[in-house]
Structure formats: structure tokens, C-alpha cells
Amino acid sequence: MFKQQPLTFREDRTFTITQFTDLHWIDGRKEDQQTLRLMEEVLDAEQPDLVVFTGDVIYTGPVSEGEHHCEEPLQAFREAVQAAESRQIPWAVVFGNHDTETLITRQELMNSVLTYPYSVTQPGPAELSGVGNYRLPLSGRDGKTAASLYFFDSGSRSTVAQIPGYDWIHHDQIGWYTEQSRNEQRELPALAFFHIPLPEYQYVWERATCYGNKHENVCCAHVNSGLFAAMVEMGDVVGTFCGHDHINDYWGELHGIRLCYGRATGYNTYGKEGFHRGARMIRLREGERTFETWLRLADGTVIRDQPEHSPTL
């Protein structure tokens, strides 16, 4: 059986990640095939070292009257990740609120993910909230850890009766992150991936210069559980990446951390006229505490400089 090799910076000191988000794959219908073509074209053009799916890879929720819903979630997921898997590109996933809405549990989906030859996803500690809280080290050319990638399960809906809306990254998950970070060298850069944006995504849009588009509300939890504060205190994370809000794609820097939305990838869900589907690209360089990021869209357009937005408060 194929054994996945450790993730390693290239000889030119780069490590490139493609972020796909909100595919909302259902059953291979026409819109799903559009999504597949987009992913194939992005991967063939960019040749990344890692693909990260930041949630809602499949859609198992309710559909409009007369529409077919997802009946085979494991098959849908297999089709959704085939662009990366068939190209033998390592890939990782965090789950979103729609991946396991019905028909399948997070644990069942994770058990399937772990069987893919090119998946580097890990289930994470069983005692933590959610499924799939894990850290992937990136090795430098000397074989030692040169950077870290953190993955968090941001849950689905709030489980606290008096708090409506979306879930949040919980205290035990944050404790796990700080412990992991404490065991690493603080000067090494880290990136973090999750599905539902943190409340700070709204704050940075209001208070700092941002780059990109905000066409809908930041649909975060109604409580702030403190993950961002923990990242500021630990000092390792230089960028975070989420999805969830399909027609937001901006990024802004707050207290030394760049909060980035991906670019929604899937055609089987809502969008906005003229706002093309695509992917966010991320490039780390060994020895540097920063990263480059750009968008690649369905029509082949590469956007390196997104429109500037001045703070409103």
C-alpha cells in the first residue's frame, strides 16, 4: 500500500497550498462536474504541494422541492476529492456544517477519509470536541520541522439551547492547540484552517484595511470562544483560512495574523452574478514568517492584488 511521505518544502524553499472550499458536492450532477473541471484546471495550472478542503465538501442538507438530495455521501465525497487524489497530490480536510447534516456522522466520514492513499488528514484526539483537530508539520530541507499547519473542526450548529446559530471552536480544542504550539518552537510559522469564520473576521473588516470582497454577512458564532486570542498569545500562527460565506473572499491583518477567506469553489450552491468560483492559493517560504496568497478563478484569471477596502469604524 502507498505510504504518504512527510510534507516537505521544495528545493526552492517553497511550499504551495491550494484551498478549495464549499464544493457542496451532491451526486455528480452537471454543477458538480463544473466544480470538478474548475479544480482540475486549478491543480494542473498551479501544481501545489498540498490541497486543503475547508469544509462543506459535500452537501447532505435539505434541497428545494423537486431536487434530488445527496443519497450516497461516501460516494459524493469520493467524487469531490478525485481531482487531488487522481493527481497524487496530498490533501487534507476539515469538515463544515453541511458535510454531515444528515445520513452520515463525522466519525463515519472521517473513517472513510483515512482510507484514501493521498489523504494526510488525521482524526485528531478522540476526547476533543469535533472530529479532525490535528496538526501537520512541514519539514525543511534539513528534515527538521520548519512550519506547522493546524486544522480545527468548527462544528455545525450551536448545541447550547439559549444560543442560536452556528457552533464555535471549543475550549478543549483551544487548549489542545496551545499545548501543541507550546511544544513547538514559537518562531516557526504556522497556518490554521477551519470552516466557519471567527468573529474577528467581522472585526478586521470594520477596523483594518482589507483586500477583497464582502458581499454577505460574516456568519460566525454568536459567542467568541477565544481561539484568535490564543493564537495571538502563542505567536506562531501567521494566517487563518476559512470558507462558509460563499461570496466573501477578503483578507485583513489583525494583531499580526492575516485572516483570510477562501474563494468558494462549488457550483451546486449560492453565489453572486459576476463573482466567479475559484480557489485561494497560499505559498510559504522556508525560513520566512509570512506567506503569499492569490486567487485563481474558473476562467483562468489570477488575482494577486484584490481591491482595497478601508475600515468603516
Image: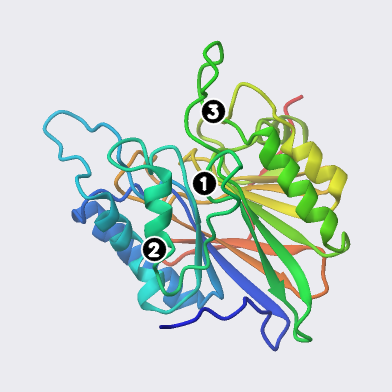
Secondary structure beneath label 1 = loop
Q: Is residue 117 above or below residue 113?
A: below
Residue type beneath disc 3: Asn
How packed is label 2: few (under 14 Cα within 10 Å), some, or many (20 or more)?
Answer: few
How packed is label 1: few (under 14 Cα within 10 Å), some, or many (20 or more)?
Answer: many
Going by the picture, which residue comes out furthest to the top? Answer: 162
In the rendered structure, the answer to whether residue 56 lies left or right of residue 131 reads: left
The mark closer to the camera, 3 or 1, is 1
Kindly indicate the quadrant of the structure image that contains residue 190. Answer: bottom right
Q: Is residue 140 above or below residue 199?
A: below
Question: Residue sitting at 78 percent across and 79 percent down?
Answer: 144
Question: Between residues 148 and 83, which one lies in front from this camera angle?
Answer: 148
On-image quarter of the N terminus: bottom left
Residue type beneath disc 2: Asp
Residue that numbered label 1 is attached to = 131
Task: Say whether disc 3 or disc 2 marks the residue closer to the N-terminus.
Answer: 3
Task: Say whether disc 3 or disc 1 marks the residue closer to the N-terminus.
Answer: 1
Contact (Cβ within 8 Å) of mark 1 with mark 2? no
Secondary structure beneath label 3 = loop
Secondary structure beneath label 2 = loop
Disc 3/disc 1 C-alpha distance (Å): 27 Å
Disc 1/disc 2 C-alpha distance (Å): 35 Å
Residue that numbered label 3 is attached to = 217
Residue 77 percent coordinates (x, y): 32, 56
Residue that numbered label 2 is attached to = 299
Question: Residue sitting at 31 percent across and 62 percent down?
Answer: 78
Question: Between residues 12 and 50, which one lies in front from this camera angle?
Answer: 50
Q: Is residue 93 above or below residue 43?
A: above
Q: Is residue 157 visible from the viewing direction of this image?
A: yes
Residue 203 percent coordinates (x, y): 72, 30
How packed is label 3: few (under 14 Cα within 10 Å), some, or many (20 or more)?
Answer: few
